[in-house]
Amino acid sequence: MKFFIDTANLAQIEEANNLGVLDGVTTNPSLMAKEGIKGEENVKNHYLKICSIVDGPVSAEVISTEFDGMIKEGIELAALHPNIVVKVPCTKDGIRAVKHFTDNGIQTNCTLVFSVGQALLAAKAGATYVSPFVGRLDDISSSGIELVAKIVDMYSTYGYKTQVLAASIRSTQHIIDCVEVGADVATCPLSAILGLLKHPLTDSGLATFLADFKKVQE
Ligand code: E4P
């Protein structure tokens, strides 16, 4: 399973990248706003900075809600760097835009997906990635991971090439759940990725090894 980091924070992106296991980055307008990035030029420069840190797909989301605006924005974003993936909401205009980008060789991430039906449309439009939002479904007492599992099954049954990118991941357990249902990618906060390292037996085992090593040195 591939790991993307779900942030626009450069320090966190660098920290995750330095682990050597990072495959890409996802952002959204809320994450950009959280970093105080304002204005078209600053946003574009920020994407370029992210692309200079990570050698992998970087999702950049369009703001327009109608087809023509999405196409204009997406073409500009894709021209920034070969690793930019244009992130498009799963709406009527969004699906049209995904198909247009697919036909023109631009990679896409179809986002804000909350149902198998939406994921079916994204795949038929040729999306590179589909993003079911796990945490936001859990927030309303619906199982986000169950949706990821259903999409993985449906794509496997019909042979769709669209990669299932589990988004809105909130915890380390969510990552483990994604592994169990066969998500292609999980985009996660840094804290959830680092949580995978935590095990008390690793800590106590290492402490014992170091203590025993000291004994043989004496
Ligand atoms: C990433 O592609 C999504 O925009 C993001 O994971 C949403 O996460 P949230 O539900 O925690 O805001």
Image (spheres, rainbow, N blue to C red):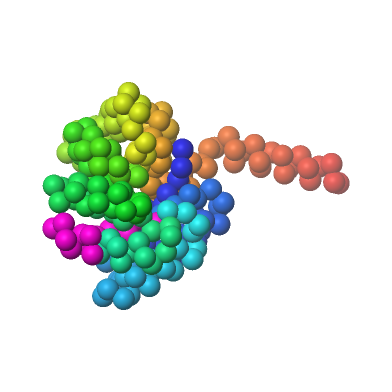
Is 50 located above or below residue 197 in the figure? Answer: below
Examine the structure image and report whether residue 60 is included in the region drawn in magenta: yes
18 left or right of 206 in image: left
Q: Where is residue 72 in the image (x, y as percent from the top left)?
A: 23, 64
Q: Which residue is drawn at 38% across and 48% down?
A: 188
- Who's the residue at 55% across and 57% down the image? 18
Q: What is the count of numbered marks?
A: 0
Residue lying furthest top: 157
Tell me if residue 74 is in the magenta stretch: no
Q: Name the residue located 37 percent from the left edge and 39 percent from the top edge.
A: 163
Front one among 162 and 96: 96
Most distant residue in the front direction: 103
Q: Residue at x 25, y 37 (%)?
A: 124
In this view of the protein, can residue 133 be seen by the observer?
Answer: no
Residue 168 at x, y = what percent? 30, 46
137 to 94, vertically: above or below = above
Residue 36 locus on image (x, y percent): 30, 71
The residue range painted magenta reads 58-72
Which image quadrant for residue 27?
bottom left
- Front residue of 141/62: it is 62
Q: In which quarter of the image is residue 122?
A: top left
Residue 128 visible in the current orientation: yes
The x, y position of residue 171, in whole percent, is: 36, 42
* Camera-nearest residue between 188 and 51: 51
